[in-house]
Amino acid sequence: MAERILTGIKPTGQLTLGNYIGVLKNLPKMMDRGECFIFIADLHALTLPIDPEVLRQNSVDIASFYLAAGLDPKRVALFLQSEVSAHSELNAIMQNYLYMGELSRMTQFKEKSAKMKESGIGLGLFAYPVLMASDIVLYDANIVPVGEDQIQHVELTRDLVNRFNQRYGNVLQMPKAEMRKIGARIMSLSDPTKKMSKSDPKGDIFLKDDMATVRKKVMSAVTDSGSEVKYDEEKKPGISNLLTIYACLKDITIAEAEKHFVDYRYGDFKKEVAQAVVDELEPFQKRYQEIVDSKSYLEVLKEGARKASEVANKTLLRVKKAVGLLISK
Ligand code: ATP
Ligand code: LTN
């Protein structure tokens, strides 16, 4: 069977180099492996308080970033989650097949809700994995490219598929998360024991940072004691993170990166890592700006929603029939 690939990014904030390396950079390669459904998880962005104008602008950004990364809208359905109503409809069905206990064990929920007052935690944040599972099964996706932090949600989707199929027969396709071998968890530059995260912006490189800022951020990244540029996640988390960034951007292995820097001191090493980031982001930003200025993303998203709806509505109908909903037309 040809592969079906699906992934999404939430328009919750400025995209980081973590998002870029973890997912964006690799997406164009997916086009050769099968049919791709790539979306902007705007309904998911509503699970935490967000200003309407910021949400809209972030959605424009992500659409333009997808295109600037090299996704070809002729070969990929690129769309807004909120413009394919089957996501919300399937969510209403699937919420009955995931349980409170398992949802409350999700790390993302625990981390995000821990920062909030209990009275302000929306149901959507708790039920987040139900919508994400609906996103995935709607397209019969078998491959879900994500960073490490999303593995748990894809595993929960697999549990749901098992549960659903045992009850109703072979209705849903079993998905599988796919992570990069290296770079699935880019760490914060200010605290390399934490994930670089757009909702915790200290230590981030943003995809829209100007080049002087990018250089400054890399040069002031936390490093470790010693002077050797060697990969050692435990003893040298800062250096290991910079080596990972370099290796991913240059498409080489960690061992090759280590070899390249064998005679380097930290200062020169950082300068070269900064240059690698600049070399990648500068042309990327140029393409991004052209797309934003031309507003070409609008036509792409419209056509993407049409293509996605065609596939999603078929799955929705299959599920409705399976659970016993009467179809009148
Ligand atoms: P938040 O910090 O607000 O939860 P996020 O960046 O983790 O945001 P998304 O924008 O939805 O969440 O992430 C898009 C994709 O980027 C996901 O597949 C996620 O796993 C991946 N990703 C996010 N941060 C990193 C990182 N530091 N390293 C590698 N991949 C990442
Ligand atoms: N939860 C993901 C975004 C997301 C997603 C999806 C990823 C929503 N639906 C379906 C893959 C497949 C995140 O927070 N990064």
Image: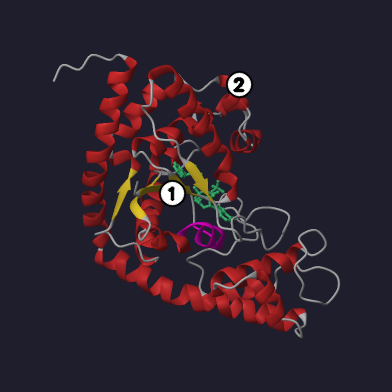
Q: Nearer the viewer, mark 1 or mark 2?
A: 2
Mark 1 Cα-neighbour bin, 10 Å: few <14, some 14–19, many ≥20: many
Alpha carbons under labels 1 and 2: distance apart: 28 Å
Q: Amino acid at mark 2?
A: Gly
Q: Which numbered tag is attached to residue 11?
A: 1
Tell me where residue 178 appears, x and y as whole percent. 51, 50
Tell me where residue 263 appears, x and y as whole percent. 77, 85
Tell me where residue 211 appears, x and y as whole percent. 53, 76
- Depicted 204 relative to depicted 99: above or below: below
Q: Which residue lies at the image location 66% right of the left edge and 81% below the top edge?
A: 271
> In the rendered structure, does residue 23 fall within the stretch colored magenta?
yes
- Depicted 175 relative to depicted 188: above or below: above
Q: Nearer the viewer, residue 82 or 311?
A: 311
Disc 1, ligand 1: is the CB inside 8 Å?
yes
In the shown orientation, is residue 111 left or right of residue 207? right
Image: magenta residue range:
15-24
Residue, disc 2: 101
The quadrant in which the C terminus is found is top left
Q: Which residue lies at the image location 68% right of the left edge and 64% below the top edge?
A: 241
Residue 96, picture quadrant? top left
Residue 324, picture quadrant? top left
| Principal secondary structure, stretch drawn in magenta | helix
In the shown orientation, is residue 187 left or right of residue 36? right
Disc 2, ligand 2: is the CB inside 8 Å?
no
